[in-house]
Every structure is written in structure tokens, then in C-alpha cells.
Amino acid sequence: MTIEDVRQIILNILADIAPDEDISSIDDNTKLRDQIDLDSMDFLDIVMELRKRFNIEVPEKDYEHLATMAGCVSYLTPLLKDRPLAS
Amino acid sequence: MRYDTIIIGAGLSGLAAGIRLAMFDKKVCIVEKHTELGGLNSFYVRKNRTFDVGLHAMTNFTAKGVRSSPLGKLLKQLRFSHDDFRLCQQEMSEIRFPEKSLCFTNEFEFMRQEVAEQFPDQIDGFNKLVEKVLAFDELNLDDGERLLSQPVLESFINDPVLIDMLFCPLMYYGNAREGDMDFYQFVIMFKSIFIEGFSKPEGGMHYILNLMAEKFKDLGGELKMGSGVKTINASKETVASVTLENEVELATEAVLSSMGYVETLNRCQPELAEAGTCETGQVSFMESLFVVDKEPRDLGYDRSIVFFSTQSRFDYKVPNDLIDISSGVLCCSNNFKYPKPLEEGLIRLTNLASFGEWDRLARKDYIAAKKEWRGRALEQLFTFFPDFSENVVFLDSFTPKTIKKYTGHINGAVYGSPEKVKNGKTPVKNLYICGTDQGFLGIIGATLSGISMANLHLLQ
């Protein structure tokens, strides 16, 4: 998977979690919670979606890496780079 | 076949928990004793008419796009769009006492203005109370020291009539305790009714329930209707299975029960020592539904909901008689902003009622008493409101006994036990509760209860 693929995966998850939000204009370096009003329950959902879709476990101490889109991509790309693009 | 979780009860809390668990691929089964969805917020059909039971309206209305409110959180967690719920807002509601009336809408500033006009010497205290309410963390799941509302309100407001007027809707729509109210519950109800407000889903309660049940099933959840639980099998303080009334045994890793705390403990085998020691709820209601041949507004009923007391002091307690006719709630379903008008006029009248008094009547006397007390309630109502008795084309009533029969809640206690179990834990380690006894109130509260208990105990 490429960096672009990983970014798209995060966007897909956000679209599922927050169906009423406009995610097309997300800025990669601004905190996600400041752009689409995510709370701690929603971060739990991102983590659980990663587990469900890719069998990736994100330990609680690493949640801070998921605060921005850029953070998500740099944290997850090494974990996903050898995966084929999931169906 | 072993389930990850069995959920007892297909009401809002059970369905919401089920959706959360099924969403993350848990093997989950909801078992429901009744043949209809909904539990305490359900519906029934008589003569081709569908009537909602339980709450008259949904509280906690916030507009589309508000995501941090309880409704916003609920929609996100269950992955519904605001539009999916088809919510139609109230027009105007009212708290009507003999000498005073306070109207309120879904815009809180309107109510603040009403208080300023009706109680000019109390508005400063009221504003300070509102500040305290807004700053209060009512969703904290830790059991702190008990704080009752009456003393808190008296510290801000020194007109007892205003205090009673504020209590009237908040107690009627969510208080399990007689006489006073836990302050965190007061805050939940104040925010959900006065700050946020009322709406009704187009299509009624069964529309929302079906929407949730369909989502649960689409995600792979299993739903067994007409399947009451006989025992929760929990030897060595761990649940291993649930036995249904038809003797089918279902193995499971955990159980989440919405049937009530004491009701749940009572089903445990072997028996739990704690089962007999817990307080059960007492507060219940009689409700009568009147289908009328005109729009209620044409009969002089132009409010969405009226909370009334025919005496200047309001007393929220289980009556000594079958019902208490001195106060009540009037709801006109028609007076919500539906895209098209409802087919018929509907007026609902709710009064506090005593389960014990209804329960001891023989069948024949019970039916006669329903008619008699409905008549008395109307007679009292018509001293305060226009008479609609000539316009009734259909009527029906239910009592605390009816509620017990269909929901299984002891005493027909609509709001459960006054002692809430906020963390959802029981003496059995993989048995949790959600719903009315966990402590989040109302339709939105019940749904959030299921979500938060599933997240806290069953998804980590």
C-alpha cells in the first residue's frame, strides 16, 4: 500500500464513523478533532475499525499518533505497507 | 455455538448495544420476551391504529451538525445520519400551574424570557442555577456523594412555586425517586428538555425501533423475539449461559441485561445473596389515549406537551389512590412540525399511579376502575382545559399493571430503581446492565446507555 492508499483508508473510516461530516476538505496537519468534532468515543472507533479491517492493534499509548491525518499516515504506513489493498 | 454477548431486551438500550457489538463483528444475540420491539418505549396496535407507549416525545433535540450533544454522539456511534431519524420538532410546550404558566420551545432563550416575565424577582437566581447546570458533569460514571436537587434549587430560587414548576416536567419525564431528584438526574433532564428540547420521529416510535433493529440484523446480529429469559446461569460468579423460557440454553461469554438491576439479579442461578437487598422502583403511570375527530388545536389544545398541576404545589409521589388526578402530562402528537399532518387527532393524558393499588384489583374491578379513574382524571382536567369529551372517537388506557405485564419491570416502574448502577456492573463479573437502571434517562439516554456499556465492558 502507498501513502495515498493509507490516507484513503483513514478517510473511508472517518466517512463511516461520521456520516454527516464533510471530510473532503480535511487538512492533514490540523488535529482531526478540531475539524470534524471527534471525541474519545470516536477515536475508539477508529482504533476498532483498524483492528476489524486490518487486524492492527493500536495500543493506548500510541493513540496520540492518530490525532492528525499526517500522524495517522506516518504511524500506519509502516504497518500497512506490505499489505495488498484490502477489498 | 457460543455468543460473545447475549443482550437481554430489545428496547433502545439493548438494540443500541447490539448495533455497537455487531458493528465490530461480535457474535451477539438479543433476546426479547415480548413479541414487539421497544420495552419501555414501544407501541401497540388497536383497531388499525398504532399508538406509541412510553415517552411522549424524544428529548435532547439538537439540530443536524451538532455532534457533541447526546443526540449527536448517539448518531455517530450508531452511524446514523440525523436525517435517518426523521425528527420533527415541537411547536411549544407549557408548564401550567393554577396562577402561573411557563412556556418553552426548543430555543432556551425563550424559556429564560418566560421566567423573567413570570418570576421577575427570581430571574437572577434562575440564571445562576442555569450556569451551575451547564457546568455540571452529569455523565461521570463514578458514584459520588448523593446530592439531591431540592436543596440546590432552594439555594438559588426562593419561590417554591417556580421550583415546583421546574421539577414538574423533569420529574414526570425521568425521575425514579419520590419527592426529590438526584441532582445529576436533574441536570440530565434540564439539559435534555429545557436546553435541548422535544421532537418526534415521523412514523412514531416503531419507525425508530425498526430502523435500529434492521441495522442490527444487517450487521449480522441475531434477534430472538418472544424469548423470555428464565435463568442467567452464573455459577462461581461467572455467567456461562442463559436459559430461555422455552428451555433452550444459549452459551455466552458475557451478558448485558436491560431488564432492570433487581430483575436481572433475580434471574441468576444459583441465587445471589444481593438479590433481595436492593431497592426497587415504585413510580409508575396510568395513561389514556383519546383519538379525537378534530385537530386538537381546534379543540383548544395548541401546545405540544403541557405539564400541569391543578394545585399550586406539585407533589411527585406514588398516590394513595389508584391515580393522582391533581397533576399530569398532556401530549398532543399533532402539535409537532410534521411535514404533513397526522391522519387523526390524538391527545394523551398521563397521571401518576400506584402499582400496588391496581395490582390488588380482581379482573372485573380492574376494568371498571380504569373507566372510573379515566373519567375522574378527565373531570379534573376539564376544570383547567377545554372539554373534548364530545369529540372522542376512540379511547384506550393502560396502567402500571399493563407496563409490568409487557416489560417485566417490577411495579411497572417506568424509570426503574431510584438507586442507579452507573458503571453497569453486577456481583457477577461478566454480567452487566444497561437501560433504565444504569441511569441515563429518556429515549436518547437509554440508547446512550446501551452504547456506553457496550463500549466500556464488551468492546475493549
Image: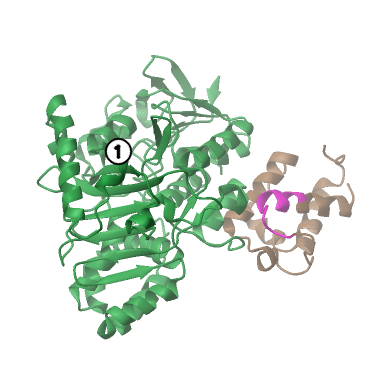
Q: Tell me, what hue is chain A? A: brown
Q: Is residue B224 above or below residue B51?
A: above
Residue at screen point 60% across, 60% down: B64
Nearer to me, B118 or B140 = B118
**Residue B451, image x, y percentages:** 51, 46
Q: What tint does the image give chain B?
A: green
Residue drawn where x is 82% and y is 39% of the image:
A86
Picture layout, residue A37 above or below residue A11: below
Residue B287 in view of the camera: yes
Q: Is residue B37 left or right of residue A61?
A: left
Q: Where does the image place residue B289, in percent across and percent down from the top left?
A: 31, 42
Figure quadrant of residue B109:
bottom left
User: What is the magenta range?
Assistant: A12-22
Disc 1 designates what residue?
B395
Q: Quadrant of residue B148?
A: bottom left
Q: Is residue A17 magenta?
A: yes
